[in-house]
Image: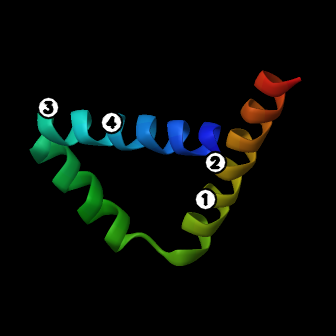
Amino acid sequence: MTDFLAALGLLLAFEGLVLAAFPNAWRRAMETVLAAPEGPMRLAGLAVGAVGVLIVYLVRV
């Protein structure tokens, strides 16, 4: 659970830094995401999730 909270904290820190450094680019990216169709977004989400699980697995082995 400690590792999960540390990973969540890092995620929030990176997201916050990107938002603070590039607010206009972040806004445009969110507008693009909102306009995108659901199918490709689901596939991208599954792919990113799988890569994340693979990275965690490789780090923990």
Q: Which residue is mark 3?
A: 21
23 or 36: nearer the viewer? 23
Q: Amino acid at mark 3?
A: Ala
| 59 with respect to 5 (left or right) | right
Q: Please say if the residues under marks 1 and 2 sit with CB atoms less than 8 Å apart.
A: yes
What is the C-alpha distance between the residues marked 4 and 1?
20 Å
What is the C-alpha distance between the residues marked 4 and 3?
12 Å
Q: Which residue is mark 4?
A: 13
Secondary structure found at label 4: helix
Q: Earlier in the sequence, mark 4 or mark 1?
A: 4
| 44 with respect to 10 (left or right) | right
Q: Which residue is mark 2?
A: 48
Residue 20: quarter of image: top left
Rendered location of residue 57, percent (x, y): 82, 33
Disc 1 crowd rating (10 Å Cα; few below 14, some 14-19, many 20+) is: few
18 or 44: nearer the viewer? 18
| 37 with respect to 56 (left or right) | left
What is the C-alpha distance between the residues marked 3 and 1?
25 Å
- Which residue does the image show at 20% across and 54% down from the upper left? 28
The quadrant of the rendering that contains the C terminus is top right
Q: Earlier in the sequence, mark 4 or mark 3?
A: 4
Q: Earlier in the sequence, mark 3 or mark 1?
A: 3
Q: Amino acid at mark 1?
A: Gly
What is the C-alpha distance between the residues marked 2 and 3?
24 Å
Camera-side mark, 4 or 3: 4
